[in-house]
Image (spheres, rainbow, N blue to C red):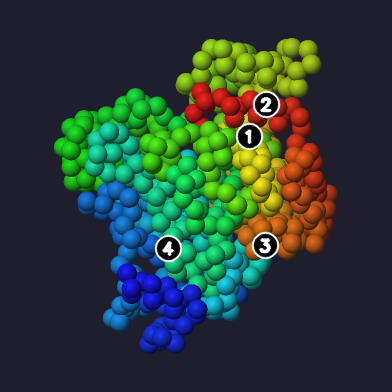
Amino acid sequence: MIYRLLLGFFASVGLSKASWSPLSSPLGPVVDLGYAAYVGNATSPTGVANSSVTFFGGIPYVEPPLGDLRFRAPKQLDERYNSSRVVSDARNWGPTCVQQPAVEGVGVEDCLSLNIWKPSKAKPGDKLPVVIYIHGGGFFFGSSPQFPMYDWVAQNQQVVAVSMNYRLHLFGFLDGLALRADGTPNAGLLDQRAAIEWVRRHISAFGGDPKKLTIAGESAGGASVVLQATAYGGTRSAPFKRAIAQSIGLYPLPLDSEIEQVFNNVTTAAGCPSGGAEAMACLRSAPLSTLIKSINNVRTNFLAPTIDGPRGFIPDLPSKLITARKFSPGLDLIAGHCTNDGQNFAGGNPANLKSDADVVATILKRYRHMTNSTLQKVLELYPSPNVTGSPFATQYDRTWTIMQDTIFGCMDQHWANATISRGGKNVYSYRFNVPNPVTRAANPFMGAMHASDVYYMFNGATGTTPFFAPFNVTEKPVAEEILGYWTSFSQLGDPSARKMPFSPKWPSFSGARRVVMSEDLNGNGASTASFVEVVPLAESTRCRWWMGQNETRV
């Protein structure tokens, strides 16, 4: 313990190189952590040497979750000073975690690593603010290479950026009575927390400030941001100062009976006993090839975060924890969503949704706990296009708006309002109103669909692994704008302080005001068409109702 405290002290005051024998490598710049050292890559994504950004990838932040550590909380590395340390190659990404659907040879269990982008000139003691990105993918797919943060640091040389891999699906979110007796639920969320804690301990060696951490994420990553902020019911201080939650994507959290049913599906496919110590021993000894069968024997989204008890990481539904003010106080917050997030979850295209029955089927497919009386209230709040005065032109518009509000569009307002009610000052909301052009070309009926903002944040990321499309002249300022807002907020808690000159000043969420990020389709690449709006009363009214409905299990 004394060694670790001394190590942290030396790193925090920038004395690492003066205190330890300097290490170097002909491969590139070296960062020495005392227990380990890493050589990074100072080449830009286009292959240009001597770039302004240096990348360190695939850095382990905990022990490999193998053998007896499978299905358990992550175990911290031995970070005591090591005089025999050698320089490890960190110029590339670490391996991807096992995904769903699982395919043998794609993804590994030993995948818990993080990636760091720093200004090449940054040195220990510079105390630059740090933004940590948590990728989305429904808690069952996704990986770091899909979300490169080079552009964040290239555009703003006053921040350090970090991304992480965390355990997904079976390995990150298996739960059940047998596991709770001999394992840890929500291991994937604990991985995220361990990565954040590693950053706090070591980011000063990369020029970062451990006291100025911002966590950010979209979809399941946005849900992760909420879950990290409500962790342990707010009884423990959050290891970060700011949060950016984008299109907060929570699938209905399961009932205890559903958790046991999923556990039984897993053990049955693996040929293991259905419960008790024998079940966990069997699952821990099973080869990955066997557990791939278990992964593919579980319905998508049914292995994800669970309520794991009053003393667990998720002691209650996040919506209820926020209502009860059981979340980390004092956080600066940005929370928002895409204009048409719900279109990806409406059950197909407009031709598939023609009647009230189609709408009901879509709702019940997602919200399996909904009572008939609640369903009738939903249909009243979102009147059929056949009803005079309905704001919906088609059943498709009606359906995607319901999915929008319940999955993505209301939790951001709920959290922002609750943060303000607790005295929060730096609280902001947004609506991202620019479509992903690659997705829209394949689905012309869609607008600014789910993950449109991700496309602009990560150099034209399309969601495939990894594929990036080039920006046209009017898309480029959209990317510059959102990165300008995000990195400015990470620096100072104010998205306007270091925004792009052409971006509108972003007001606080008091008065339900939010920025609408929009593309100037008729422009010459010199600006965007973004503006400020007040959240429509009908939207905020629907959201207040939804956030009080426990049947959605979010």
Question: Could you tell me which residue is drawn at 76 percent across and 32 percent down?
Answer: 536
Q: Quadrant of residue 352?
A: top right
The percent position of residue 89, horizontal first and vertical second, equals 39, 73
The percent position of residue 284, horizontal first and vertical second, equals 21, 45
- Label 2 sits on residue: 542
The quarter of the rendered structure image containing the N terminus is bottom left
Q: Marks 2 and 1: in contact by CB < 8 Å? A: yes
- Label 3 sits on residue: 492
Q: Quadrant of residue 6?
A: bottom left
Of the image marks 3 and 1, the number of the one nearer the N terminus? 1
Crowd tier of the residue under label 4, counting other residues whose Cα lies within 10 Å: few below 14, some 14–19, many 20 or above: some
Question: Could you tell me which residue is drawn at 53 percent across and 33 percent down?
Answer: 320
Instruction: Name the amino acid, label 3.
Output: Leu
* Residue 119 seen by the camera: yes
Judging from the image, what secondary structure is the residue with disc 1 in? loop
Of the image marks 1 and 4, the number of the one nearer the N terminus? 4
Left or right: residue 554 compared with residue 517: left
Q: Tag on residue 410?
A: 1
Q: Tag on residue 198?
A: 4
Which is nearer the eye, 19 or 134? Answer: 19
Question: Could you tell me which residue is drawn at 37 percent across and 57 percent down?
Answer: 112
Q: Nearer the viewer, mark 3 or mark 1?
A: 3
